[in-house]
Amino acid sequence: MAQRPIISFLLGAALLATHAAAEQPASTVHPTAQRLTPRSGDTATLRSEHFVIQYDPAYLTAEQVEEARKVAEAGWRHCAGRFGIEGPAQIVLDLSPDFLGATGFAVPAEANPRGGRQQEARIGVRYGDLDYLGLPAPYVITHEIAHLFSGSLGGSALGEGIADWGAGGFAGVPMAHWWGRALRQGDLWIDPEALFLSGEFAPAPEVNEVIRTARYAESGLLVFYLVERFGWERTRRFAEEYDRLRGPLESNEDRRRRFAERPRNPSRRTAPPAIPSAAAIRTLIEQRLGVAWDTLREDWERRMGETPMPAEASARLVLAQQIYGAIRNYEMWLIEQRAGPSATTRTVVREAFTAANAALARGDFQEAGRALSRARRIVGYLRNPPLTT
Ligand SMILES: [Zn+2]
């Protein structure tokens, strides 16, 4: 399977600014970029069966690294079962990458843009930040490993969904059809017709909890359903063709704006990005999956409606998506600030989000909700300081 030449996919649906982003096919380009700066501290290395683990011993203890090693090996085996293939024999796992705006990233083995020696497959996870980010290590690490197992689909339209399906859960809640109902009730749902076919839905100029949940969880649920009904191999082939018709799971308005704001190379004429053709996607679904989209969607929604929805797990899922979406939104804003808030202020925000996630982890949803509101208020204040006259 041909790999795209340069793909950097982040858990945050964004690309690393370190590569020639402008040269990438449209579907691997996301609107925002993180800075990945070279690490300044020491690097220690731990080897295991499938991973070369790199970390900064000033930030992580030997116990934490050993725990990460176990999680990574379990994630590798989980993905081998899910995808039915042997994945990369060796993956570099960076546990102390320095970036904001996402929690992890994955770069496939053939991604060396300068030619020469082939780079090893690499994933990175902000392992020391997970209490603040609120994501369990098995989810993040397995999600990134799943990107590598999904090969060229990693940066495709359903790429984040495939990686979330590969990870198999979120916030410790195993993926299930009832997620669709819970997310819809929690206002974290985009109408599937709009998200997957037409692109006609409300724009999200900034990453927010709705678009983040749609690109990952809702897309993951579609993959979950397709694999259950058609198997992974057929779903994989469909996802490749679907990507060419749909492009990134963004609204048409966001796509037009992203194109308009893109830095131009005057020597190259670039056509505006295509707005997805819902009719063409319907035809593709019918041809490749042998069923009309309306019938497929009805059956999918029936399964979402029929599966019993456990109250505690659904509350946890929705809150976890809300908190993480709010953190993503805050960090993406942070990256764009030339002179951002002071280190002290950042610590205050970090503590507020950490408190929300700690309450969520111990099952105190009321306190988690309160702490999230507090964190949002602080961020709101930073973004729009009240005027003093
Ligand atoms: Zn991802």
Image (cartoon, grey):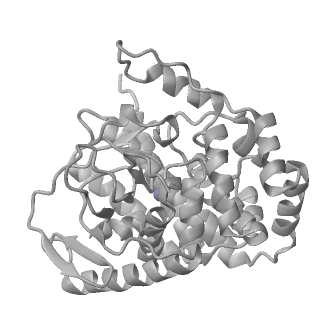
Q: Is residue 113 visible?
A: yes
Horizontally, residue 71 falls left or right of residue 152, namely left
Q: Residue at x 53, y 54 (%)?
A: 153
Horizontally, residue 192 falls left or right of residue 257, namely right
Q: Is residue 357 above or below residue 196?
A: below
Q: Is residue 356 visible?
A: no
Q: Foreground residue, 315 or 364?
A: 315
Q: Residue at x 20, y 71 (%)?
A: 54
Q: Is residue 6 above or below residue 68?
A: above
Q: Residue at x 37, y 22 (%)?
A: 263
Q: Quadrant of the C terminus?
A: top left
Q: Is residue 377 above or below residue 364?
A: above
Quarter occupied by residue 306? bottom right
Residue 179, position as x, y percentages in the image: 71, 67
Residue 215, position as x, y percentages in the image: 59, 51
Quarter occupied by residue 265? top left
